[in-house]
Amino acid sequence: MTTEHTTSRRPRVICHMMTSTDGRIVVDRWPVSDEGRRQYEQVHAGYDPDAWICGRVTMEPFAGGLRAEDEVARQHSGGPREDFRAPGEFDSFAFAIDASGRLAWESSDIDGDHVVAVLSERVSDAYLAFLRERGVSYILAGARDVDLPRALERIGAEYGIRTLMLEGGGRINGGFLRDGLIDEVSLLIAPVADGRVGTPALFDDEGEVTPRRLHLESVERRADDFVWLRYRVDSADAPTS
């Protein structure tokens, strides 16, 4: 199956991130102004997206807590189960990639965005029941780990998402890049040299990595010496699976 955007129902994916000049993405202690930090949300809003998506670590503060290890260890061993969409009308969505079901959601809403958990099939029936009780929707895609191409197809087909902002950590971003699922990179570079060893970078992938060529679309200087770069990722450059 090809993952090219033109032959699938998946959304257009924009990887939108703030980085230091050396590509680090953990922004605490960065010496920048509040106006500089606001550039990130301003650029995000300018895309007028339908939804955004992050991994478990990024989503943990929004969820409110983590499940106990013994609960996470209880895994499903039966057949496939149906996705769940909570009742109600929703205008925007926050998708949380959480393969093992670690997030203990206290609410089904993040600043007006309805929460949808993206899970692997190994999560237990008890966890799915917990999500339904909380009013959190979920998508099941992949046996042990989340199958990103399949998940994006479901996000497009079941939720009608056409523009999706990828704002994850380095490993989630790296997985999307590896699978050829990013259409555009929106990079807001802060006037900061981080230098902290071991700090996550924009793209981190522990698997077999093929460096990708990006095509510069625009450069814009913004408040507090931030620079906004936009890169196109050609579908012709994407790997197939």
Image: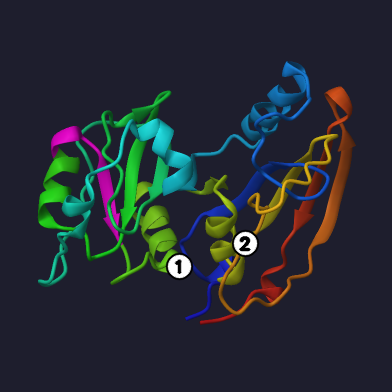
Per the rendered image, the range of residues in magenta is 133-140
Q: Secondary structure at mark 2?
A: loop
Assess whether residue 150 is covered by the magenta stretch: no
Residue flagged by tag 2: what amino acid is it?
Asp
Q: Give the residue drawn at x 27%, y 35%.
A: 105
- Residue 204's label in the rendered image is 2
Res 92 seen here = no
Residue 62: image quadrant is: top left
Element class at badge 1: helix
Badge 1 vs badge 2, beta-carbon distance below 8 Å: no
Q: Is residue 170 left or right of residue 93?
A: right
Q: Residue at x 37, y 64 (%)?
A: 146
Q: Earlier in the sequence, mark 1 or mark 2?
A: 1
Instruction: Tell me the residue that label 1 is attached to.
Output: 149
Instruction: Provide residue 210's location: percent of width, then percent of height.
Output: 68, 77
> Is 147 located above or below residue 132 in the figure?
below
Callout 1 crowding tier (Cα within 10 Å): few <14, some 14–19, many ≥20: many
Q: Looking at the image, which residue is at 67% across and 70% down? A: 235
**Residue 31 in the image: x percent, y percent?**
78, 25
